[in-house]
Image (spheres, rainbow, N blue to C red):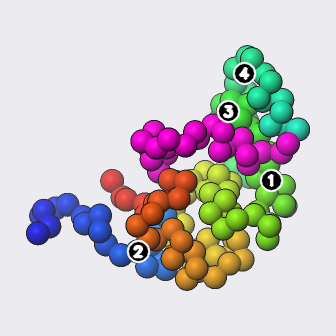
Amino acid sequence: MAIPGKPSTLIKPTLDTKFNVDYSWWDRNSEDLRTYLLSHVLPEQRERIIQSEEHRVVDFIDPLTGEVSQLDELQLAIKLAAQDPNFINPQTSLVDSIFRVFLANNNEPLSPRELAERIKKDPTTILKTIGGIRIYKGIKPHLDE
């Protein structure tokens, strides 16, 4: 029986259900977020970040909005990598491609249909992958709070 006023977490996602990365999922699992994020940056940036002992923060100016935000080296490397036309390519796995879309769009929720437009994959395949019981890389239906 559902609790009044509480949405069911067992609702079956559709092609129009919005998804995004739930970063709290990473806190509850054995996978290391930083290591996974490093796999999405350019190799030369990855090596520099791994070898860097200092934690630097820089101002980043969004070229589209002019908004200024403070980013650490890894966040900046991801922003720069996301601007590369090969950031999402046919050789990138489906889950990694979806995750990279969320990295590139500041984790704004998107439906499988919207994801399909960005990664050029079938939306039904996307839904079957991220809309099932297993959670990949924290990609889950977005819950409005």
- Name the amino acid, label 1: Gln
Name the residue beneath numbered marker 4: 56
- Would you say residue 105 is visible in this rendering? no
Q: Return the x and y of residue 28 as percentages of the image width and height.
A: 42, 42
What separation in Å lies between label 2 and label 4 (alpha carbons)? 40 Å
Q: Residue at x 70, y 71 (%)?
A: 119
Q: Is residue 108 above or below residue 123?
A: above
Q: Are marks 2 and 3 in contact (CB under 8 Å)?
A: no
Q: State which tag comes first along the sequence, 1 or 3.
A: 3
Q: Is residue 50 left or right of residue 114?
A: right
Q: Nearer the viewer, mark 2 or mark 3?
A: 2
What separation in Å lies between label 2 and label 3 (alpha carbons)? 33 Å
Q: State which tag comes first along the sequence, 2 or 3.
A: 2
- Secondary structure beneath label 2: loop
Residue 71: numbered disc: 3
What separation in Å lies between label 4 and label 1 (alpha carbons)? 21 Å
Along the line of sight, which residue is nearer the eye, 54 or 69? 54
Q: State which tag comes first along the sequence, 4 or 1.
A: 4
- Secondary structure beneath label 3: strand
Q: Is residue 43 above or below residue 132?
A: above
Name the residue beneath numbered marker 2: 13
Within-10-Å neighbours for mark 3: few <14, some 14–19, many 20+: some
What separation in Å lies between label 2 and label 1 (alpha carbons)? 30 Å
Q: State which tag comes first along the sequence, 2 or 1.
A: 2
Q: Residue at x 70, y 65 (%)?
A: 93
Q: State which tag comes first along the sequence, 3 or 4.
A: 4
From which residue to which does the magenta span run? 21-43
Q: State which tag comes first along the sequence, 2 or 4.
A: 2
Q: In what quadrant of the picture does the N terminus appear?
A: bottom left
